[in-house]
Image (cartoon, rainbow, N blue to C red):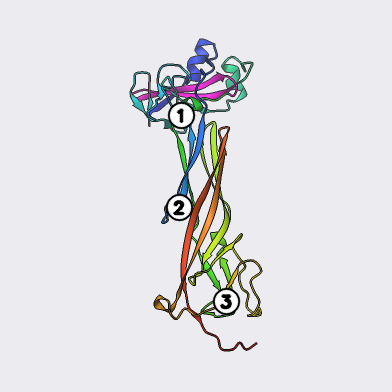
């Protein structure tokens, strides 16, 4: 561990408050969501950050900070970590994190400055030591980190596996209603958020329909997950929202079973960094094999 010498002691000797000038204008922070309809692992990558460029808009304006290649450097051009001990690299090669100094500390630093701004802990690391202390950064909003936001934060929005519930359980019968339903974990909104200080992007995936390919050439489209069949329900009663009636047995199909395939269509919306968007057409798929038998009579 490097020995940390608080800069407050140095500033006390000087009898002044260290003020950091407002950051220079930079490209607006951005957010984005890109989805992959990979059948084995469909999902979306949510990003938050800044378009990049040679960033010298950080405190210190020393020519360091984040570059267009997504790496952080000090004023000498040497690569440094973008984040260290919870603080973010500035263009001066030092690290900044929001802090809340005590009233006595603020008084020792010359009092609370007027105008918009905020207190930050500034730490500058040397070869074998670290020098740091509280500094006031002027500006509205009082942020340091967006100046190093060529860095991107990423979050993964994974869609759930499709689990099919054929009801009643077991073999299905010709000319009797089959209730089609999905496990509740397969249907519902899912969200992921990518954040860097000052920028947060949230993507939410919402299922909009389920298309059931029943294996007999019929496709059933439902607006929801369907209703689970309950024991004691009249076998001749149709599902209230998602069902199918087989008109022929599966005896002539491969293995004597129908392949029932369900495709859930999702709509992904995202918002953040003053932007928003929609990604339609993402899908998840599940399949089960079901045997459909002829029924000569139904006893109630």
**Residue at image x 34%, y 26%?**
79
Q: Quadrant for residue 275, please give it.
A: top right
Dot 2 surroundings within 10 Å: few (below 14), some, or many (20 or more)?
Answer: some
229 vs 87, left or right, is right
Residue 239 image label: none
Total numbered badges shown on the rendered structure:
3
Give percent across and percent down for residue 292. Answer: 50, 79
Does the image show residue 196?
Answer: no
Quick one: label 1 or label 3, which is nearer the N terminus? 1
The residue to which callout 1 is attached is: 51
Give percent across and percent down for residue 104. Answer: 60, 21
Quick one: label 2 or label 3, which is nearer the N terminus? 2
The residue to which callout 2 is attached is: 42
The residue to which callout 3 is attached is: 168
Magenta span has 46? Answer: no
Dot 1 surroundings within 10 Å: few (below 14), some, or many (20 or more)?
Answer: some
For the residues labelled 1 and 3, say whether their Cβ atoms are less than 8 Å apart.
no
SS for tag 1? loop
Distance from disc 2 to disc 3, alpha carbons, whole Å, reads 30 Å
Distance from disc 1 to disc 3, alpha carbons, whole Å, reads 54 Å
Q: Quadrant for residue 229, please give it.
A: bottom right
């Amino acid at each position: 561990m490097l020995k940390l010498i608080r800069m407050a002691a140095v500033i006390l000797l000087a009898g002044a408050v260290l003020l950091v000038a407002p950051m220079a204008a930079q490209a607006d922070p951005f957010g984005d969501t890109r989805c992959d309809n990979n059948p084995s692992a469909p999902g979306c990558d949510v990003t938050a950050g800044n378009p990049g460029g040679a960033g010298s808009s950080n405190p210190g304006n020393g020519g360091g900070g984040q570059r267009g290649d997504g790496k952080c450097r000090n004023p000498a051009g040497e690569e440094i970590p973008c984040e260290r001990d919870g603080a973010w690299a500035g263009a001066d090669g030092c690290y900044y994190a929001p802090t809340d100094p005590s009233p006595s500390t603020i008084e020792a630093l010359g009092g609370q400055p007027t105008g918009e701004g905020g207190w930050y802990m500034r730490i500058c690391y040397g070869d074998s030591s670290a020098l740091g202390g509280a500094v006031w950064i002027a500006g509205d909003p009082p942020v340091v980190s967006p100046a190093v936001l060529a860095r991107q934060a990423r979050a993964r929005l994974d869609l759930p596996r499709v689990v099919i519930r054929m009801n009643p359980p077991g073999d299905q019968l010709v000319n009797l209603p089959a209730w089609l339903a999905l496990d509740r974990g397969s249907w519902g909104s899912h969200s992921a958020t990518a954040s860097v200080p000052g920028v947060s992007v949230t993507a939410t995936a919402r299922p909009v329909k389920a298309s059931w390919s029943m294996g007999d050439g019929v496709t059933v489209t439902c607006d929801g997950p369907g209703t689970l069949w309950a024991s004691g329900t009249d076998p001749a009663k149709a599902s209230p929202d998602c069902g199918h009636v087989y008109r022929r047995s599966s005896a002539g199909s491969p293995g004597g079973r129908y392949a029932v395939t369900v495709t859930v269509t999702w709509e992904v919306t995202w918002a953040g960094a003053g932007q928003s968007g929609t990604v339609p057409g993402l899908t998840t798929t599940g399949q089960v094999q079901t045997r459909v038998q002829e029924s000569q009579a139904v006893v109630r």
